[in-house]
Image (tube, rainbow, N blue to C red):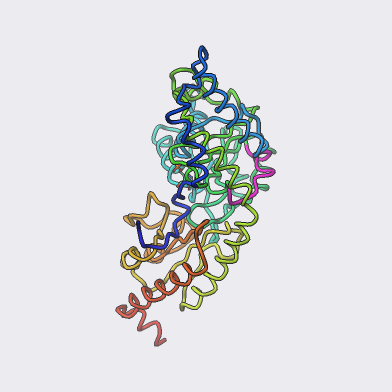
Amino acid sequence: MYSQIYLDYNATTYCDPAVLESMLPFFADNFGNASSDHHPYGWMAKNALDEATQNISKLLGIRKDEIVYTSGSTEGINMILKGIVESKNSAKAHIITAKTEHKAVLDVCKHLQNNGHLITWLDVDKNGIIDTVQLENAITTQTDLVAIMYANNETGVIQPLDEIAAICQSKNVPLFSDATQALGKLSLNDFFQKVDFACFSGHKIYGPKGIGFNYIKKEQATALPPFIHGGGQQRGLRGGTYNLPAIVGLSKAISLALQQLDQENTRLKNLKDQLEKELQTIPEIQINGMDIARLANTTNVSFPFVDGKNLLRSLSRKIAVSNGSACNSAAEFPSHVLIAMGLEEPLAFASLRISLGRKTTGEDLQKAIKYIKEAVNKQRENNILWEQHQSL
Ligand code: PLP
C-alpha cells in the first residue's frame, strides 16, 4: 500500500478489523430490512439494530430514543441547524456559533444567514477559545441555539463546555456541540448532561465511513421537524432503510474506543509531548493552542519563514499530514481556524496538523521529525527573509 507514515487520524481512521468482522454477517446472511416486521429476515435485522442501539445507549449513558443514525457529522449538523430554523415556521432564527467551527457548521450557518436568519459569529483568543462573556452578551430572548464544538479538529483545542453549558442553561437556550473529534478521545461521562444536541461520526473512531449519529435530548424530542421524509424510520426524523452493517460496526467501534480510551490517551500524550519537544528545537516554530487543554493526539505547528504549499508538497510522499481540515487541505485557502486565532495568512499556510492514532509508533515520529526538519531547513535555505532575520 502507501509507504507514507499516516499522521492524519483526525481526517479519518482505518476501519478496525474487529469492526469489519462484526459488520460482515449483515451484508449477505442477515440481510433483512429492520423495518420488515412480518418475517424472520426482518426480525433478525431488527434484533441486531436494537442490540447495537442498546449497546451505544448503555456505553454513553443516554436513552435509546435519544439516538438518530445519520450518514455522519455533516448530515447530523445539517439536521440540527436546519431543523431548528425550520421549526420556526418562517420566523427569523438566531444561532450563535464560533469562527473556528468545522466547515460543516460554518457553511450551513452561512447558508441560513443568506436566507435572512441571524447568525452571531463568536471570536476566539490566540489559543482558539471562545470568550464566554461575548457568548453571554450575544444571547437574547430571541436566540434559538448555541452551536459550539467540543474539540477542534485542526488544533485539538477543547472548549470550556462546563462554562458554556452553564450560560446556556441559565439563559434557557439549547446547546448543540459537535463532538465528532471528542468521541473516543475524551471521556463523555457528563457531556450529555450539558448539551441538548450533539453529532458523532463512525469514521473518526475506527468505524466505517457513511455512518454516524445525532444525540437529541429527550426534552428536545419534538424540537426538530423530519429531516428526510420517507418511510418514517427513526421516529419520523430520518426516513430510509437502516444501514444495518454500518450501525453494527459503529456500535462495535464505540465499544472498542471506550475500552481503550485511557490507555490510548496516555500513550498518545507521551508520543505527542515527545514530538512537540523535538519540533520545538526548530527555531521560531509555534505550537498553536499550546497553553490550553488539547486532545492527546493532535498538534498543530506553524513554521515562520517557510512556504506552506512547498512544505506540504515536499512532505507528501513521506508523511500523511494536513494543513487544515481534510476538506480544506488542498490549501487553496489558509485555515480559517488559525486565521481566527490571529495568525497571518502566510503563517497559517505554513502550518501542519499532525494527528496521531492507534498505529502511530515512536519510531514513526522520529522519522517524521527528521523529514519535517529537513523540509523546513530546505525551505529556509532559499528564503532571503530568513537570512535577514537570522542576521538581526
Ligand atoms: N465536525 C468535525 C469536528 C469533524 O472533524 C468532521 C470531520 O472532518 C465533521 C464535523 C464532518 O464529519 P463527517 O466526515 O462524518 O461528515
Is 237 positioned to the left or the right of 51 in the image? left
- State the residue lying farthest toward the front: 29
In percent of width and height, residue 288 lies at 51, 64
Q: Which residues are magenta?
A: 184-195
Q: Is residue 271 above or below residue 200?
A: below
Is 154 positioned to the left or the right of 165 in the image? left
Which residue corresponds to the image point at 52% horizontal and 69% vertical from the top-left? 275
Q: Is residue 120 above or below residue 80?
A: below
Q: Is residue 278 above or below residue 256?
A: below
Is residue 219 rendered magenta in the image? Answer: no
Residues 130 and 136: in front is 130
Is 9 positioned to the left or the right of 319 in the image? right
Q: Quadrant of the C terminus?
A: bottom left
In percent of width and height, residue 119 lies at 48, 39
Which residue corresponds to the image point at 65% horizontal and 39% vertical from the top-left? 59
Q: Quadrant of residue 262?
A: bottom right
Residues 131 and 59: in front is 59
